[in-house]
Image: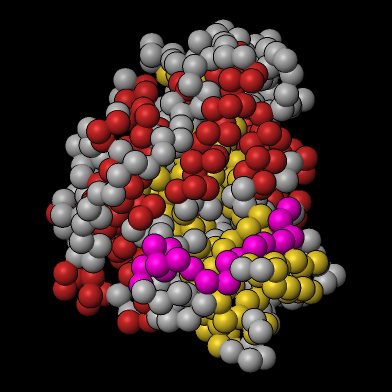
Amino acid sequence: MFHRPLNRVQAIGVFVLGTWLGSCAPAKMLAPSQARGENATISLPMREFRAVWVATVDNIDWPSEPGLPTHVQKAEAVAILHGAAEMGLNAIVLQVRPHCDALYASQLEPWSSYLSGVQGQAPDPYYDPLQFWISEAHLRGLELHAWFNPFRADHPANPSQLAANAIARQSPELAVTLGDKGYRWLDPSRQEVQDHSLAVILDVVERYDVDGIHLDDYFYPYPSYNDHNDFPDDLSWARYLDGGGELTRSDWRRAHVDRFVERLYADVKTADSSVKVGISPFGIWRPGIPQHTDAGFDQHEMIYADARRWLHEGWVDYYAPQLYWPISQIPQSFPVLLSWWTRQNPHGRHLWPGLYTGRVKPNGWAADEVVNQVMITRGLQPDAPGHIHFSARALDGERVGADDDSLTTALSRGPYAKPALVPASPWLDADPPPTPELDVSVRGDAVLMSWRRAGGERPFLWVVYAERKLRGWEHHILPAGRTGFRLPLTLTEEQSGTEENGQLLSVAVSAVDRLGNLSAPQPRAIP
């Protein structure tokens, strides 16, 4: 996973799509942010959410198969995390509840069968996978967002029977069977269902040091899961009508999903206001909107998701519409759809689209398609850009083949060549942490930096700044566990790319809190 060393330089391609992107991207998108220090003007690090989904259902990304020994599961997880950090990503979105199961120690739901092969069976030797992922992610300076499927109760890929404590067995009246493919679904109209799914999510918020809670597009099931028959909630619908209900059946179903999303946001903020809430809906709100868009699928009427409303209401901290189409596909054009979503955001929440990175060769797309989508996202969201790749296996050179790993090369040497901080979320917290206390000393041909926290909240990251002759400022983003850094006084010609020696002129350090707020750097000249 992600761990193939980059062994060649390949062409990155054209990042900006000619005059189209030039006309839509504000000029400031390429201008460095500035902060006035005591003795110099410091360029601040760029901001961009760079994430990847790690899918566990059907062992898509991790673990590679059920029943692997604990040490192999851990090694695979570390490979994904190490590769993500090396590539320049800064966040992982890990699927921890594929279908009313748990990839962590839970008193509410059984262990996932994608770990052991048997639902309800803990890893052996025992460990808590979610805790392991969080610790290893934070060790590398990566955010870890926990991804939940709120209502899916069973999946045809499940290699096991449902455990005795699975909700679909404990309370069978809350679940329905869809066709003959092996899907089971909780009925979202049942209060007990919503209460249970929210309790599961809040349990994770309260017990684990997650950075975000994430839902994808599975609310009511896609029609194909039920052989294109209507969702079997006749009993619940009849009870609603008997109670005097006046909504249409479509509106009634959407109201349940709306209520769940609203409650989720409010309850997570009550439990821990620093945990971000994100949703990744199907990328087109309604067919024909925006003009000339033809989805062939209407999430509003088929999975009863009014995705635009959740963004309008501000029930999220970030939105990741699944824009799984290429730039030039006119009926579903990536830039046209992203531009439309940016205009549906009255609360100024983060808009970080999902990219179908798995479509890159040998599955069809050239690497430049994804690189250009990243650049378009920067142009349309210049102040707080971001995106999420689907999925981790698409960024694993070993899985896609030694001759087809140009995507990771193009990204890491192109738009990810410079490190980036996750954009701040000022509606949650806008207070920067104190600037750390910095000590600088020169030892031979190196500058040694050490720093210590200056009170306030515990930092999540550090940013080290280094100003070099003719090169300006460079940035190094370090995890909170690092409190020292070594910089060469001069660079070799190979390192600097010029005949100049890249002499180090000044340095600084900032603290970054859990919501991306950055302390003011105070530059120190190198004697």
**Number of residue marks:** 0
> 326 or 435: which is nearer to us?
435
Task: Residue 191: tell me if it is visible.
Answer: no
User: x and y percent of residue 73 in the render?
Assistant: 59, 23
Asked if the stretch drawn in magenta spans residue 487, the answer is yes
Colour mode of the rendering = secondary structure
For residue 144, above or below residue 348: above
Numbered range of the magenta stretch: 480-498
Asked if the stretch drawn in magenta spans residue 92, the answer is no
Left or right placement of residue 210 versus residue 398 in this view:
right
Extreme bottom residue here?
Answer: 39
The quarter of the image holding the C terminus is: bottom right
Q: Who's the residue at 50% across and 62% down the image?
A: 420
Extreme right residue here?
Answer: 455
User: x and y percent of residue 346 in the render?
Assistant: 47, 71
Quarter occupied by residue 120: top right
Q: Who's the residue at 30% across and 38% down the image?
A: 405
Q: Who's the residue at 30% across and 63% down the image?
A: 376
Left or right placement of residue 419 versus residue 327 in this view:
right
User: x and y percent of residue 290 in the render?
Assistant: 25, 61
